[in-house]
Amino acid sequence: MALGPPELRARISDASESPESYIEKEQALRTKGNQISVIFRYNSAMQPHTLSRRSFLAFSAMFPCALSVRAAKPIPVGLELYSVRDELKKDPEGTVRAVAHMGYQGVEFFAPYFEWSENQTKQMRKLLDDLGIRCFSTHNGSSYLSAENTSRARDMNLILGSKYVVMASADPKPGLDGWKTVADTLNLAADQLESSGLKVGYHNHQREFIPVENQRPIEILAKNTKPSIMLQLDVGTCLEAGSDPVAWIRTNPGRIRSLHLKDWSPEPAKGFTVLFGEGAAEWKNIFEAAESAGGVEYYLIEQEGSRFTELDTARRCLQSFQLIHSA
């Protein structure tokens, strides 16, 4: 995942800094990162060098290897904090600190973050920076992406350092036209947020994979939204609906930029309570599709509950992910 220039990860050193100046600084740094990239390419092109035949052959031999190393860059894994929702409610900072110490590289905040004050949001960002982890994205109620709320969503996500503002679910009017209205809302939110360096996403549940009038709503959303809008795949609910996550990823190349790694068992007594790796998901195939075709930038472990405590569940799922993904 391209996380921007090093300045974006800088610690918030002045807790008294106004939210407006902080947001402007974040936007400027994102723009600066793009400029640095362009300048680097321009200067490289404008600095000719004479290579000997031997040097040219040596460089040519190394170039494919360099590309291979770049392509093999590990995909970071974070935790959707709904997985530790009770702990987060009791002690937000302590819970985020515990998650970071487990080895997670980032987090995704969910709906309650939207009620934080600006100072609380800044303090959370400072904690993330101190811990060396990122807020990859946030989960938002559909109303948070309405025209009257997008400015607040923008400000909160810029302070947190998030890249994606994800609509967590939708409750449209019956029929395909209702889902087309959801697509329109996503497109409008993208138009309003992308100028600030933020991207919009949509997170599926089971219902998006259940046909309506002979067409799956998720297909309506994919067809009627801008390519810049991420289709965040919840693997478990896709399986629960009887769909194939690998096929869905390959049908939408470049748009599955994050996945909720939630497993699922067809056994009624287990369902979503199985840990990562214990259910029906064929994770190796899913990872291969996500990384070769889906355009995945980050993974998110998500757990709705298990036979263990929330924090122990998060730790065990991360350990299983590390074993399965590296195998």
Image (spheres, rainbow, N blue to C red):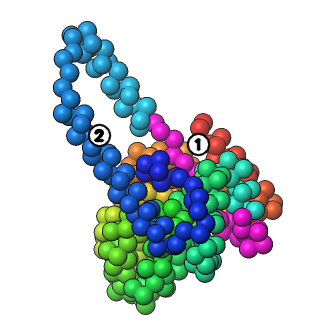
Of residues 246 and 77, which is closer to you in this image? 77
Of residues 191 and 250, which is closer to you in this image? 191
Residue 210: x %, y % from top left: 47, 75
Residue at image coords 52%, 67%:
159
Residue 215 falls inside the magenta stretch: no
Residue 218: x %, y % from top left: 41, 71
| Magenta span of residues | 72-93
Under tag 2, what secondary structure?
Answer: helix
Crowd tier of the residue under label 1, counting other residues whose Cα lies within 10 Å: few below 14, some 14–19, many 20 or above: few
Residue 92 falls inside the magenta stretch: yes
Res 212 quadrant in image: bottom left
Residue at image coords 78%, 56%:
312
Q: CA distance from mark 2 to mark 1?
A: 34 Å
Q: Which badge, 2 or 1, comes first in the chain's sequence?
A: 2
Residue 2: x %, y % from top left: 43, 49
Examine the rendered structure and indicate whether residue 309 appears above or below residue 223.
above
Residue designated by label 1: 325
Q: Decide if residue 167 is in sight here.
A: no
Res 178 quadrant in image: bottom left
Residue designated by label 2: 40
Q: Amino acid at mark 1?
A: His
